[in-house]
Image (spheres, helix red, strand yellow):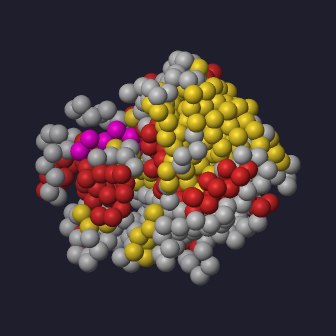
């Protein structure tokens, strides 16, 4: 097998990948036991007024020489359509709780300027506002997810924002929308009632925020047939008290989802998070155990939610997740610009496997963030744009959108990082799409060892198998403007299927998705 793996590795990249000893693992996929649908919204996005996310990222303006649709880069629009972008969260983040939406409507030249105090103290000229955002969502065919201002706004302000966007009738505020060029209301479903209200969204206690939520949410009305899906500003990582209070103090009928924010830090230290590209094996594996912590968080938060909502009506909305490193040297510390390596692809795959396997409770997840910020899918430099390894993982995993989650049993080796935290060598998930085809995604986080995986397909006989892989020579490889396709998704032909049995060698440091046709 070692020789086979080596040959495969050479074929993949033209150069030899690190090949160590082979491990073994066993996977059972129960194809007849699917109950839950993997929401497409798990593959959601987030674009905040932060650094070069909107300005210099998505938004170039209608007069730009960079090809654009209504001022938004066409290359990014096209790529987002390719990955079936299901939703886009906006305008923040911390920015949401200091954003006053009325500053972002009307003729652009008349819009007031403000200071973006959270993110670099730069001037925000409000040229990208409600109309620009909602028109972009229409072009993308994606659901808007708007986060309202609780921290520094008023109940009236949030209430009127909903009315401005969705009311199809005569009112001062709906007429203002019409004057600004939009006759028909838009549809908006996902509505966040504040963001991180335990921190940048007002430094509130859980009890105080729960009371505020009830007041703000009451006046965020449903107009016509528009139905809001109201999302409570939820806990920071392992703050289980916050979740308990949200579930207890806010009746189920007054909320549809509760958010959860958790970032993957290599060092676990906010003042020295580690470089996005310069890291050693030890720091790589502490990043992996930090990524796996998401599973514990979702499990424990779900247990609390189950106590108050046993029918699982309320969604856990992981609306900020991803890696957070030190900013790239020489860039504005308030802009959160970082590179994206093969390590980020592994982290993305692990997180998707976790989210999919918790499809009963996780109704949405939004990576932070879309362009030029944190674990971005796209980096831009003037007219240049590149897709990061994380983009390719979104592309690979889109087959799971709206598919039925299949229960699995995975037996794989466990290892320890330098801090003594354990992680499994492989992570996996499986689903069946509406045509009855099965997809199995597997991440091998091991830097040196490939894994001989034997898989039993209970209740499913495959007529045909194919696969895709994302891997590279070194874990800190990345796509640059000079070499934008260093890491992409390849066809992978190492899968063997016979009846209900499948075998495959999963190369070290790779993300693989196998497609099985019935
Ligand atoms: O994604 C960057 C920031 O991280 C968001 O603005 C905030 O919600 C979180 O702390």
The answer to whether any part of residue 487 appears in the image is yes
Q: Quadrant of residue 143?
A: top left
Q: Residue at x 35, y 35 (%)?
A: 228
Q: Nearer the viewer, residue 190 or 87?
A: 87
Q: Nearer the viewer, residue 454 or 349?
A: 454
Q: Is residue 325 left or right of residue 251?
A: right
| Position in image of residue 56 (x %, y %) | 39, 73
Q: Residue at x 73, y 56 (%)?
A: 19
Q: Residue at x 31, y 42 (%)?
A: 188
Q: Is residue 375 above or below residue 137?
A: below
The answer to whether any part of residue 156 appears in the image is no
| Position in image of residue 27 (x %, y %) | 66, 30
Q: Residue at x 21, y 40 (%)?
A: 167
| Position in image of residue 392 (x %, y %) | 49, 55
Q: Is residue 212 left or right of residue 185?
A: right
Q: Nearer the viewer, residue 477 or 20?
A: 20
Q: Is residue 347 magenta?
A: no
- The region drawn magenta spans 186-193
């Amino acid at each position: 097998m070692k020789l086979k793996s080596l040959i495969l590795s050479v074929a993949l990249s033209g150069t030899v990948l690190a090949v160590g000893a082979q491990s073994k693992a066993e996977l059972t996929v129960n194809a007849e036991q699917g109950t839950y649908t993997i929401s497409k919204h798990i593959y959601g996005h987030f674009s905040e007024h932060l650094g070069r996310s909107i300005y210099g990222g998505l938004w170039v303006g209608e007069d730009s020489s960079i090809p654009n649709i209504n001022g938004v880069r066409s290359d990014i629009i096209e790529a987002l359509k390719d990955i079936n972008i299901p939703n886009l969260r906006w305008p923040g983040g911390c920015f949401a709780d200091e954003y006053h939406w009325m500053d972002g409507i009307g003729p652009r030249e008349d819009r007031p300027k403000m200071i973006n105090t959270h993110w670099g103290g730069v001037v925000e000229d409000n040229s990208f506002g409600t109309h620009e955002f909602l028109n972009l969502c229409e072009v993308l065919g994606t659901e808007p997810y708007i986060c309202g201002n609780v921290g520094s706004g008023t109940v009236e302000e949030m209430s009127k924002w909903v009315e401005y966007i969705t009311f199809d009738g005569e009112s001062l505020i709906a007429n203002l929308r019409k004057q600004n060029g939009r006759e028909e209301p838009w549809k908006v479903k996902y509505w966040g009632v504040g963001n991180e209200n335990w921190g940048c969204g007002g430094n509130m206690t859980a009890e105080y925020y729960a009371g505020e939520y009830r007041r703000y949410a009451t006046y965020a009305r449903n107009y016509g047939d528009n139905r809001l899906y109201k999302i409570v500003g939820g806990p920071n990582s392992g703050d289980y008290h916050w979740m308990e209070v949200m579930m207890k103090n806010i009746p189920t009928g007054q909320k549809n989802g509760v958010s959860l924010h958790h970032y993957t830090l290599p060092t676990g230290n906010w003042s020295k998070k580690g470089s996005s590209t310069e890291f050693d094996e030890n720091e790589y594996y502490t990043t992996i155990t930090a990524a796996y912590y998401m599973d514990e968080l979702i499990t424990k938060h779900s247990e609390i939610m189950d106590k108050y909502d046993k029918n699982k009506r309320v969604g856990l909305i992981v609306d900020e997740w991803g890696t957070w490193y030190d900013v790239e040297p020489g860039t504005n510390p308030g802009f959160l610009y970082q590179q994206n390596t093969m390590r980020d692809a592994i982290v993305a795959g692990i997180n998707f496997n976790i989210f999919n396997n918790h499809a009963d409770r996780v109704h949405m997840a939004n990576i932070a963030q879309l362009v030029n910020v944190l674990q971005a899918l796209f980096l831009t430099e003037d007219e240049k744009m590149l897709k990061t390894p994380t983009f390719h993982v979104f592309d690979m995993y889109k087959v799971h959108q709206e598919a039925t989650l299949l229960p699995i049993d995975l037996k794989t080796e466990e290892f320890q990082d330098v801090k003594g935290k354990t992680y499994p060598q492989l992570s996996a998930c499986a689903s069946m799409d509406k045509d009855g085809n099965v997809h199995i995604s597997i991440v091998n986080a091991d830097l040196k060892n490939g894994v001989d995986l034997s898989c039993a397909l209970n209740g499913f006989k495959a007529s045909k198998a194919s696969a895709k892989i994302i891997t590279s020579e070194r874990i800190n490889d990345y796509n640059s403007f000079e070499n934008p396709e260093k890491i992409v998704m390849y066809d992978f032909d190492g899968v063997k299927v016979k009846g209900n049995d499948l075998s495959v060698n999963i190369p070290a440091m790779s993300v693989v998705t196998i497609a099985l046709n019935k």
